[in-house]
């Protein structure tokens, strides 16, 4: 049975399965889905929980045998949580299924699972977790339903830009906003600006990746965050100069080389070296503007 994550709570209120397969790569949703399954089992009695990691498909038999011992006298149910990057080997997993043993399998192989023959035959609950595309809608609903906060359009846009679809950080920010505004009031962007800090944590590698991929908006945002955090300009320049030298020697960065000529890379190196000299001489007037221009030259 295929159930979307927002339907699982209602399903668990009325039904129970011996096998749950959670598939996806969104950490917050994955965590909350697993918590719902654990909470349901805990409501039925004392649960013995075992967690195992299976990296290779051939390891399924050995790993499952290690946790297939008899249930402890102190527990009523056993929950075996399997974290794997391989396609689940349900033939082995089925051997453990009983009235008091439950399996919770967490994997990222969504398409592989749905194409398997056993998927249509086996009685299980399959919860696919897809990347949330409508992040604005997610923020609006999350704020209203979980945190009882009403946000205007500018506030939602501000949160989206600040956290770049990091749902864990977004949810924490909403929780902090709720603490400051405990009553259900209508909040604007300026109301929450002083409540939260910028949890978008970036480093120079993130900036280089954005430059190489030609992601202008992300590049601007990363530079703004680095500037606000008073990041050392010399470190940024040093890494940019290294990257430009690599590009000039015809490296594997094909996306960049399709946009840039050797001549333009040489000019950027000269510009970067001038900025480095200015920074070392503490001539920091407009240094961040110039640094921003240097990264734009990579696009």
Image (spheres, rainbow, N blue to C red):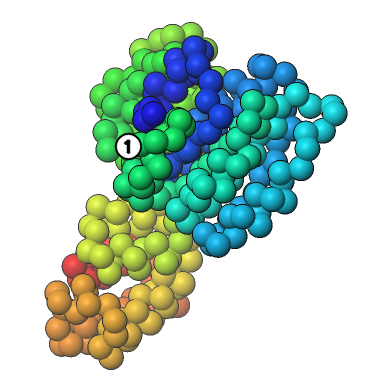
Where residue 208 sits, quadrant-wise, is bottom left
Relative vertical location of residue 254 with respect to residue 31 in this rendering, above or below = below
Q: Position of residue 158 (x, y in %)?
A: 32, 34
Relative vertical location of residue 19 with respect to residue 250 in this rendering, above or below = above
Q: Nearer the viewer, residue 262 or 274?
A: 262
Query: Crowding at label 1, few (<14), some or many (≥20) Cα neighbours within 10 Å?
Result: few
Would you name the residue on which mark 1 appears?
A: 132
Residue at horizontal 50%, vertical 51%? 89
Q: Nearer the viewer, residue 213 or 28?
A: 28
Residue 176 shows up from this direction: no
Relative vertical location of residue 32 with respect to residue 52 in this rendering, above or below = above
Residue at horizontal 72%, vertical 51%? 66
Residue 66 shows up from this direction: yes
Q: Position of residue 100 (x, y in %)?
A: 67, 27
Q: Position of residue 274 (x, y in %)?
A: 31, 81
Q: Position of residue 99 (x, y in %)?
A: 64, 26
Q: Count of labels shown?
A: 1
Where residue 244 sits, quadrant-wise, is bottom left
**From the viewer's perspective, is 80 left or right of 165?**
right
Q: Secondary structure at mark 1?
A: loop
Q: Which quarter of the figure is the C terminus placed in?
A: bottom left
Q: Which quarter of the figure is the N terminus placed in?
A: top left
**From the viewer's perspective, is 31 left or right of 79?**
left
**From the viewer's perspective, is 171 left or right of 249?**
right
Residue at horizontal 85%, vertical 28%? 73
- Which residue is the extreme one toward the right? 73
**From the viewer's perspective, is 127 left or right of 76?**
left
């Amino acid at each position: 049975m295929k159930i979307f994550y927002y339907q699982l709570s209602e399903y668990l209120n009325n039904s129970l399965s011996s096998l749950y397969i959670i598939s996806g790569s969104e950490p917050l949703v994955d965590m909350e889905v697993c918590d719902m399954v654990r909470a349901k089992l805990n409501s039925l009695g004392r649960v013995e929980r075992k967690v195992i990691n299976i990296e290779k498909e051939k390891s399924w038999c050995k790993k499952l045998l290690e946790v297939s011992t008899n249930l402890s006298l102190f527990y009523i149910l056993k929950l075996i949580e399997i974290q794997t990057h391989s396609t689940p080997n349900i033939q082995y997993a089925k051997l453990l299924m009983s009235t008091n043993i439950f399996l919770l399998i967490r994997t990222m192989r969504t398409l592989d699972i749905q194409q398997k023959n056993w998927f249509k035959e086996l009685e299980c609950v399959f919860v696919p977790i897809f990347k949330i595309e409508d992040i604005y809608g997610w923020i609006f609903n999350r704020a209203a339903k979980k945190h009882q906060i009403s946000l205007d359009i500018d506030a939602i846009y501000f949160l989206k830009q600040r956290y770049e679809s990091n749902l864990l950080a977004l949810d924490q920010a909403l929780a902090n906003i709720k603490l400051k505004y405990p009553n259900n009031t209508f909040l604007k962007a300026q109301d929450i600006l002083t409540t939260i800090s910028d949890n978008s944590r970036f480093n120079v590698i993130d900036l280089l990746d954005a430059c190489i991929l030609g992601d202008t908006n992300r590049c601007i945002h990363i530079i703004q965050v680095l500037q606000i955090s008073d990041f050392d300009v010399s470190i940024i320049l040093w890494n940019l100069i290294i990257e430009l030298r690599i590009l000039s020697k015809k490296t594997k960065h094909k996306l960049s080389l399709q946009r840039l000529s050797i001549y333009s890379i040489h000019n950027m190196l000269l510009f970067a070296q001038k900025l480095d000299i200015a920074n070392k001489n503490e001539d920091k007037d407009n240094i961040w503007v110039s640094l921003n221009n240097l990264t734009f030259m990579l696009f």
